[in-house]
Amino acid sequence: MSEINSHLWELLFRGLWVTVQLTIYSAALGAFVALVVGIARSHRLRTVRFISGLYFEVFRGTSALILMLWVFFVLPLAFGWQLVPMWAAVLTLGLTYGAYGSEVVRGAMAAVAPAQREAGIALSFSPAQQLRKIVLPQAWPEMVPPFNNLLIELLKGTALVSILGVGDTSFAASLVRNATGQSAPVYTVILVMYFVVAFVITRVMRLVERRAKAGIGQRPATGGSSSEKSGLRHRSDPAVEINSTGGAA
């Protein structure tokens, strides 16, 4: 590692910053897509479910690398304009991981007890109100752990963008390796870099999970009795208490 001078270290850290930006932008797009498509896959209309399900199947069954190349090289032939490599990568990663995330959203929403929806109907909530006040607040804590895994996979998936010439961590590592002729020190450094970023993401997401559970009245798994952990209070409407048995008081 002593052979990596300050200029090359700066190159590696610039690449790390690009990787972080790619992860943030792609995660933001992916979260939006996951929420929209996940809700659409639970829609009452069969047409909406079919279209959203088709999107999910297409992006789940397509290689992210090949799709990234298609967006960058083939899409301009159809529309006459070309995305810069950075945004072509963000679009591809966001749409791909958003499709995976939509299954997390759909599954978490399906896990909400039917009695909770029935309570909303009894209170004359519209479908949108049921979704906003009952379903999503209870489904959100169940989404966070799978979303954490998807974020880590997305972080590692950003290494694919080097094929488009985006100066991310892996691209910078290749430049440093060529400059120094040393592979082991360089790739050991970027392994540590990826691990540190993944560790930070995991810590943040666990904090988000704890806050999400606290928001619906669930205590952390390390404390409280089983009856306290199962109690759910819907905070959006203080007049309505939705408990673990599905009743409304």
Image (tube, rainbow, N blue to C red):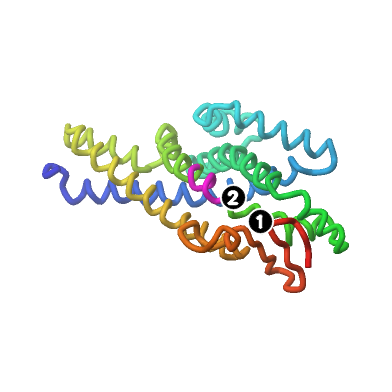
Dividing the picture into quadrants, the one containing residue 96 is top right
Name the side, left or right, on which 170 lies relative to 81: left
Q: Amino acid at mark 2?
A: Glu
Q: Which residue, as the protein is rendered here, is positioned at the far bottom?
A: 238
Quadrant location of the N terminus in the rendered image: top left
Name the side, left or right, on which 70 lies relative to 51: left
Of 167 and 198, nearer the camera is 198
Q: Amino acid at mark 1?
A: Gln
Residue drawn at x 44%, y 51% is: 21
Q: Residues within 10 Å of mark 1 (few under 14, many from 20)?
A: many
Mark sitting on residue 138: 1
Is 145 colored magenta in this rendering? yes
Name the side, left or right, on which 204 lies relative to 215: left
Mark sitting on residue 142: 2
Of 91 and 107, nearer the camera is 107
Look at the numbered disc 1 and give the secondary structure of its residue. Answer: helix
Look at the numbered disc 2 and give the secondary structure of its residue. Answer: helix
Cα gap from disc 1 to disc 2, whole angstroms: 8 Å
Q: Tell me, yes or no, if residue 26 can be seen here.
A: no
Highlighted range, magenta: 143-149
Q: Tell me, yes or no, if residue 109 can be seen here.
A: yes
Q: Position of residue 161 (x, y in %)?
A: 44, 37
